[in-house]
Image (cartoon, rainbow, N blue to C red):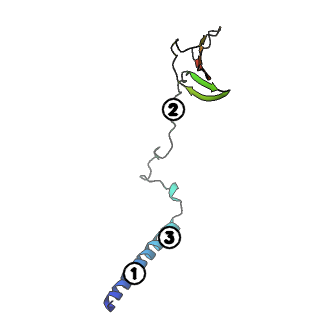
Amino acid sequence: MSGFSKVQHCGAWRSAVALVAVVTLGCAAVALASDHPPSSVTIGAPGAEPSDEGKPRELPVVPRAPKPPRSLLRCWQAGQMIFEGRGYGPLPTTQVAADLKPSDSASGRIQVLDMNYGLCILELPK
């Protein structure tokens, strides 16, 4: 390596260090010169009323409609629940072992399925 390329390399390194030092000192001077934190500074014309731009707005609360009731299917085998799910429609009468309707008109109906080695109950909403 020639002596000239060594001088160029050192000069570039010194320039980079000097630039970082100047930027760091400049930022420190600005931070010390500021009497107020940056969040309290407002930008606007002198004598003008402050705008509502920075203030959080309250949005109107829209009530959600209640979810419609969904069916519930539960299946057991050997005395243990093996499946539970929601959102099933009524089953065809050819597959239903028993179709139970409660005496009160408030609730829906229940369908019982016999699966030979298991049992499924489908609760349908009204």
Which amino acid type corresponds to the residue marked 1 in the rendered image? Trp
96 in relation to 34, above or below: above
Which amino acid type corresponds to the residue marked 2 in the rendered image? Pro
Q: Residue furthest top?
A: 103
On the image, numbered disc 1 is attached to which residue?
13
Q: Residues within 10 Å of mark 3 (few under 14, many from 20)?
A: few
Q: Residue at x 54, y 24 (%)?
A: 67
19 in relation to 59, above or below: below
On the image, numbered disc 3 is attached to which residue?
28
On the image, numbered disc 2 is attached to which residue?
60
Distance of label 3 from label 1 (alpha carbons): 23 Å
Q: Residue at x 59, y 13 (%)?
A: 97
Q: Which mark is residue 23?
A: none
Distance of label 3 from label 2 (alpha carbons): 44 Å
First in sequence, mark 2 or 1: give its number: 1
First in sequence, mark 3 or 2: give its number: 3
Q: Element under label 3?
A: helix
107 in relation to 43, above or below: above
Q: Determine which quarter of the picture holds residue 43.
A: bottom left
Q: Residues within 10 Å of mark 1 (few under 14, many from 20)?
A: few
